[in-house]
């Protein structure tokens, strides 16, 4: 592609209508511009050029951007068969899975540190005495976390979510 350089073009190779003379648009410039646009549509799009569709370039770019984002996300997210997973967004890593009382090891440790672990009980029998049902994280590091429970509903199972870097 090239910038307009015909009679009447500005010193920066732009268009002008005044003062005279106005920029003369040449066939060479129009053909070059047309080919640049057609190349984008044909390279990125899935449909052949259609003279009745004035949205082809936008659609081709949109398809490309969506496919690129989907590919990038699939590269960032990993899952395993036991419903654990991880997502990395820049330096921040999110992990999730299921666990139980005692030691819970991350399938893959955080490179530096685990900042926080939260969980939701998946088996919490209600015996009517909520005061004896205590579940807490007693330690955590980049490799995993330990959970202790008290009360008569042992063992506790839960879904967990961890964030770190």
Image (cartoon, rainbow, N blue to C red):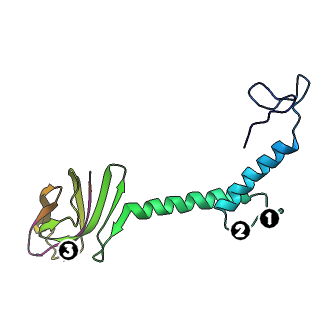
Say left or right for 26 vs 134.
right
The answer to which of 161 and 31 lies nearer the viewer is 31
Q: Residue 57 appears in which quarter of the rendering?
A: bottom right
In what element is the residue under mark 3? loop
**Residue 26 on image: x %, y %:** 87, 40
Mark 3 or mark 2, earlier in chain? 2
Q: Which of marks 3 and 2 is in front?
A: 2
Q: Magenta stretch mostly in which secondary structure?
A: strand
Range of residues picked out in magenta: 148-162
Task: Sort mark 2 into few (<14), some (14-19) or many (20+) by Cα contacts within 10 Å.
Answer: few
Indicate whether residue 154 is drawn in magenta. Answer: yes
Locate the N terminus and report the quarter of the image it occupies. Answer: top right
Residue in the image at 34% along x and 66% along y = 78
Say left or right for 73 vs 23.
left
Image: 97 above or below 16: below
CA separation, marks 3 and 2? Answer: 55 Å
Outermost residue toward the front? 28
**Residue 75 on image: x %, y %:** 40, 62
Task: Sort mark 3 into few (<14), some (14-19) or many (20+) by Cα contacts within 10 Å.
Answer: some
Tell whether label 1 touches label 2 (CB within 8 Å): yes
**Residue 4 on image: x %, y %:** 79, 36
Residue in the image at 74% along x and 40% along y = 2
Tell whether label 3 touches label 1 (CB within 8 Å): no
Q: Mark 1 points at which residue?
A: 50
Image: 135 above or below 4: below
Q: Mark 3 points at which residue?
A: 124
Q: Mark 2 points at which residue?
A: 47
In what element is the residue under mark 1? loop
Say left or right for 71 vs 134.
right
Q: Residue 49 appears in which quarter of the rendering?
A: bottom right
Residue in the image at 30% along x and 77% along y = 81
């Amino acid at each position: 592609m090239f910038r307009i350089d015909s009679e009447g073009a500005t010193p920066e190779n732009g268009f002008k209508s005044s003062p005279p003379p106005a920029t003369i648009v040449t066939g060479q410039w129009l053909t070059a511009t047309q080919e640049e646009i057609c190349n984008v549509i044909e390279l990125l799009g899935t449909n052949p050029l259609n003279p009745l569709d004035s949205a082809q370039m936008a659609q081709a770019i949109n398809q490309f951007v969506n496919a690129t984002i989907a590919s990038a996300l699939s590269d960032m997210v990993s899952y395993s068969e036991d419903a654990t997973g991880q997502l990395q967004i820049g330096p921040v890593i999110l992990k999730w899975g299921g666990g139980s009382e005692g030691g819970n090891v991350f399938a893959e440790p955080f490179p530096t540190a685990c900042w926080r672990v939260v969980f939701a009980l998946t088996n919490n029998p209600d015996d009517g005495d909520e005061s004896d049902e205590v579940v807490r994280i007693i330690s955590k590091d980049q490799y995993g976390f330990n959970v202790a429970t008290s009360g008569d509903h042992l063992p506790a199972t839960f879904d967990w979510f961890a964030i770190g870097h």
